[in-house]
Image (cartoon, rainbow, N blue to C red):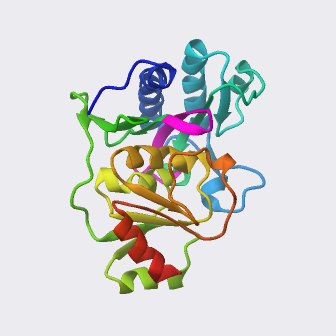
Amino acid sequence: MKDAPRDDASHFIEVFRLAALQAGWVTRRLQGEVRSKSKKGERSPERAALTSVDLAAQDIILLLLHEAFPQLNMDAEEETDTLGFFPATDTQRPTIVVDPVDGTLNYSEGSRDYAVMGAWIEAGVYRSALVYFPHLGETYWASQGHGCRLEKGGKTPEEVTIGRLPARVLVTSEVSKQQCEAVRDIGFEVMRTRCSAVDATAPITGRAAAALSSGRPDRRRAIGCFPTLEAGGVLWTGDRWWAGEDPLTMPTYIGSTILADSKDTVERILRAVS
C-alpha cells in the first residue's frame, strides 16, 4: 500500500484523528453520567437520540477543524454554535462531514457500540474518511486510491484487508422480518444493529460478512462505507455499485443497500431479499 500524498484530504485525516481521539476520550469519561434528550421531528429512536455529550464532542471536533480548514463547507450532525464559525455552503468548495457520536442511542444505554466519524468530500466524491471506536481504541481511515489503515492502542498503523469473515449479516431497524428470514434461509446469522458505523465497517472490523439496510445511504453512513470500499469491500446501492459518490448527488430509492466483503455475497443476499 502506498502512502497517500499529503494533500488537503490526507491532511484532514491528520487533523481529524486528533479531534476524534479528544472527543472519544470525553465520551468515555462521561458515558452513564448524562441524561438522554430527543431531537424534534425525528421518527425513529435511533435518529432522535441526543445527549449533551454529542454537543460537547462536536464542539471539540469543530474547533480543531476550524483552525485547520476555516473556509470549508461543514456538514455536522448536531446544531451547535460552532457550526457558525464556518462560512455558508459553497458548492465549489470541499465539504467536511462530521458525526460526533454515531450510535447515540447505544451510547446512552451504556453500549460500547458507538463511534466518532468524519469525512472529506471533494468534487462530488469521498476523498478520505475516518471512523474511531473509543471503547475499542480502534481508528480506521482511508484515502481515495490508497487503501484502508487501522491504528489500535497507539501501535503503528497497519494495512486493513478483508479476510475470512463470519457468515453473519448486520441489519438495520428498517429491514423487515421477512427479509431477515430470507437472509437466514440462505445460511447467514442475522443481527440487528443501531449504529451505522458498526454495520458500515463490518467487513473490515471482522464483525460480519455483510450489512443490509434500505434506501440510499446518507452522508454519515457512507463515512464507514468508504474505508470498507478502500479495503476491498463493495456496496450495492439500489441499482448500482457505489464508487464513493456523495449520496446527495445520487437518486433516492426504496430498494436494498448491501455492504459486503464481495460481489458474490451481495448477489446472494440481493436474490434472497428481492
The answer to whether 221 appears left or right of 76 in the picture is: left
Magenta span includes 185: no
**113 shown above or below 208:** above
**Residue at 46 percent of width and 80 percent of height:** 271
**Residue 31 visible in the picture:** no
Q: Quadrant of residue 77?
A: top right
Quarter of the picture holding the N terminus: top left
**Residue 218 visible in the picture:** yes
**Residue at 34 percent of width and 38 percent of height:** 147
The answer to whether 104 appears left or right of 226 in the picture is: right
What is the residue that sits farthest to the top in this orientation? 67
Extent of the magenta region: 108-127
Q: Position of residue 24 (x, y in %)?
A: 44, 33
| The one of 30 and 114 positioned closer to us in this rendering | 114
The answer to whether 235 appears left or right of 45 in the picture is: left
**Residue at 55 percent of width and 26 percent of height:** 61
Magenta span includes 109: yes
| Marker count (numbered) | 0
**Residue at 68 percent of width and 47 percent of height:** 248
Q: Position of residue 258 (x, y in %)?
A: 47, 65
**212 shown above or below 8:** below
Q: Position of residue 251 (x, y in %)?
A: 69, 57
**56 shown above or below 135:** above
**28 shown above or below 220:** above
Q: Position of residue 38 (x, y in %)?
A: 69, 51
